[in-house]
Amino acid sequence: MARALLTGLATSIAVGRAGVVWDEEDPSGDDYKRSGRLLLGGVVRGLGSGAIAVAIAAASSWVTIDRGRPGLGALVSMVVAAATTVREELLLRALPFHFAKRAGIDDRATVVFATLLSPTPFLLAPGATPAAVALSLGFGFLSARLLSRTRSVWSSIGSSVAARIVLGPTLQTAVLAFGWQKGEATLSPLAAGAPAWIAAGIAALVGLVAVPRVTKLPKKKKKKT
């Protein structure tokens, strides 16, 4: 947990020095309502994509779901997931978008590039599967589209954190007990089978059709004198 927190903090400082801001429309970070709204919007999309995939797997008898045993480990896992997400979203999404904008590169090309970066943290890991790469690309595309449309890393962080919780060890071993009978939909190098491919497709579809543009802060009304 300490390593995840420290690397997340160090990454935030480093990309900040490079000129990256968390929200281009609110660089000072004063509009907490906007940040919260974008974070919640990302969480809803990431959570929804993962939950739909798990529901399809359960309906197809690919996974059994029982009660888990929540404990301190679940809380630690959530903190680690959040810190890891901050690091990866800043490095793999916010930083490329920042330099692409400075270079005048079209957002569509940047979305593709940022999506392709998604599996790089585990691509050379032993046992990494094609399904794991596809799943990472699907949720990476969702995050990249959110950042492209909202110009705020809060939305992409919310989506990725929610996905890591639903399709990661926190939910599948602590809050609930998942028993995969066919394949495995998990954001790890070991994802496999139809559940992972379906989850990847759902995330990509959500990123393609369910990401509204939210870029402008509401104008403040002038006081009458």
Image: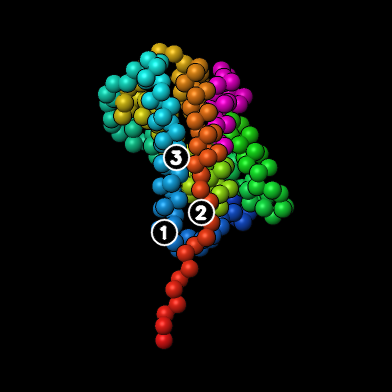
Look at 48% across and 68% down and name the residue there. Answer: 219
Residue in the foreground of this view, choosing between 221 and 39:
221
Quadrant housing the N terminus:
top left
Magenta-drawn segment: 122-141
In the picture shown, does residue 126 fall above or below 84? above
Write down the quadrant of residue 125 in the picture: top right
Ranked by sequence position, the earlier of labels 1 and 2 is 1
The residue carrying mark 2 is: 214
Task: Say if the magenta span includes residue 96.
Answer: no
Q: Position of residue 87 (x, y in %)?
A: 53, 42
Task: Where is residue 38? Give x, y as percent.
Answer: 45, 51
> Foreground mark, 1 or 3?
3
Amino acid, disc 2? Val
Helix, strand or loop at disc 1? helix
State the residue at coordinates (37%, 19%). 59
Kind of residue indicated by mark 3: Arg
Name the residue type under label 1.
Tyr
Q: Which mark is residue 45?
A: 3
Tell me how far mark 2 sits from mark 3, CA to CA: 15 Å
Q: Which residue is mark 1?
A: 32
